[in-house]
Amino acid sequence: MPDLRGLGVSPGRTAGPVLLMAAAPALPPPGPPLSVEAGTAAVAAALSAVAAELDRRAGRADGEARDILESQAMMAADPTLLETAEEHVTGGMDAAHALDAAFTGHRVALVAAGGYFAERAADLDDLRNRAVAAVLGLPMPGVPDPGHPFVLVAEDLSPADTAGLSDDVLALVTEKGGPTSHTAILARGKGLPAVVACAGALTLEEGTLVSVDGATGEIRTGLDAPAAEEIRRQAEAERAKLAHSRGPGKTADGHPVKLLLNIGSAADLAPEAEGVGLFRTELLFLDRRTAPGFDEQVAAYAAVFKAVPDAIVRTLDAGTDKPLPFLELPVEPNPALGIRGLRVDRLRPDVLDTQLAAITEAARATGAEPAVMAPMVSTRQEATRFAERARAAGVRRVGVMIEVPAAALLAEAILAEVDFLSIGTNDLGQYTFAADRQHPALADLLDPWQPALLRLVETCAAAGLAAGKPVGVCGEAASDPRLAPVLVGLGVTSLSMSAVCVPAVREALAGHTLEECRAGARTALQRDHATIRP
Ligand code: PEP
Ligand code: MG
């Protein structure tokens, strides 16, 4: 098996056996009906195997993951589900179709019940896939849980798959995905080495020992067990070295650069950083069918403000790869260019009003003074209107994200309206290069070293220096230890990233003087192409 190469999107090296994520089972054509006894025995065995497997996993999990697995196990053991499946068998169906029909009936009832119950429909779909796979003798779909460390290889992973990964997953390798896909972001959040857009990954055989380099994107095959062990040992030594890195971010000659955290909820807070530079509030409400209420939002924001009173909160950034079903946005032919981010306010102004009110109430209740910024601002007028709304709601520090080239070009005018800018290089790259941020074949265009992207960063940073206002980077570019000094050389005042990335960025900054950072920035700007990732 030859070595493979993809895009390294979450740094770190490791090695271990490959396990493939099995796809959801397809129903075969209806088979000859078994005897009723054999059919009912098969559905009962499948459901109890699924419940037992989920119980086993719950026993090894803790916290929220344990609760979720336990409640799924209870759903699988629900006697009415078994009775319905048995009725279908008695009516002449084979076991797989009887299970499918039983789950479909329960799903319809759940969705009709609405609210909390409707949100459990996805859990039921997962159970259906497991039960049908069990009865057909196929591998369990979803993330495998073999009880030993492994490298997870999949076509792609949903945010839900990535969020629920067990500690046994050593690294992620996917055939699809891009450098700024939310799967890549979540992998970095968990500190898992990850390689995406890796052609041929699904041809790796189960159990093959591979090494994964999440910085270079290299997957090496043909290892023996001692070599894999040695790679894991070296990676552990590297991690241990970085574990001692502490303190505020600064260059070798003491120029301060705030190192901040990107978080999706209070659970992502960590002591490594100097604050929160991006609180992605929409991650709290992904897949929700009903709008989060005022009180629920206050509680979620207060949990963060209690720990980090000056956190930078981003208002909901819905649309394209982060759907918020409760917004019931129109289906669009070109969603990335449509109603997303702040533009949702054109259709649903109530959503921003409720959110701003919840943020200021959470701030009042905790004595915090958070900053609030809007995603996907394109014009000075949008910045003005957002700043007026936020200030009227009681927010003292108001900023906007720079994710659209039009906004970067007008950074000076926009900074006259707000207190700070935060550059979202993920979307800024996407819109500068007209390249879908999830598109594996366009990864070179999305490389944050692209000089055109760096020039836009420079424009924003220069506007910030002139106005005496902070300009940070909160896109994934900020977490690249090779690029971070370049961004500082361009004049950026803070870098915001997942907690796991902070130590390597801190060490990288400490290794260069400000003048060296500036020289690096000049060189990067003058190139006529992106550097090739090492
Ligand atoms: C960005 O676009 O760089 C950003 C930080 O926002 P998100 O990745 O959540 O779209
Ligand atoms: Mg963005």
Image: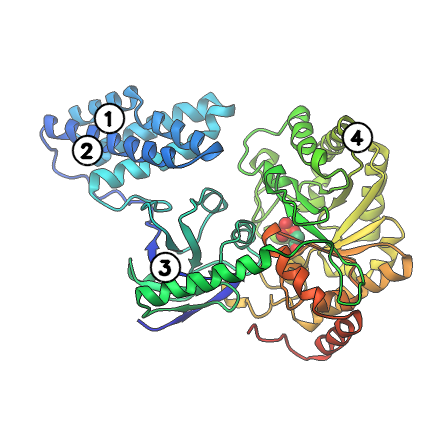
Label 1 amino acid? Ala
* Mark nearer the N terminus (3 vs 4): 3
Locate the N terminus by quadrant: bottom left
- Residue under numbered circle 2: 95
Dividing the picture into quadrants, the one containing residue 356 is top right
Can residue 477 be seen here? The reply is no
**Image position, residue 468 (x, y; %):** 90, 56
Q: Residue 326 carries which label?
A: none
Q: In this view, does 510 lie above or below 354?
A: below
- Residue under numbered circle 3: 16
Badge count: 4
Depth check, mark 1 against mark 3: the one in front is 3
Q: Is residue 496 above or below residue 462?
A: above
* Mark nearer the N terminus (2 vs 4): 2
Dot 4 alpha-carbon crowd within 10 angstroms: few under 14, some 14 to 19, many 20 or more: few
* Mark nearer the N terminus (1 vs 3): 3
Q: SS at mark 2?
A: helix
Q: Do the residues labelled 2 and 1 touch (CB within 8 Å)?
A: yes
Question: What is the CA distance from the residue labelled 1 to the residue labelled 4?
Answer: 55 Å
Q: Which mark is residue 367?
A: 4
Label 4 amino acid? Gly
Question: What is the CA distance from the residue labelled 1 to the residue labelled 3?
Answer: 40 Å
Q: In this view, does 398 lie above or below 46?
A: below
Depth check, mark 2 against mark 4: the one in front is 4
**Image position, residue 187 (x, y; %):** 52, 52
Label 2 amino acid? Ala
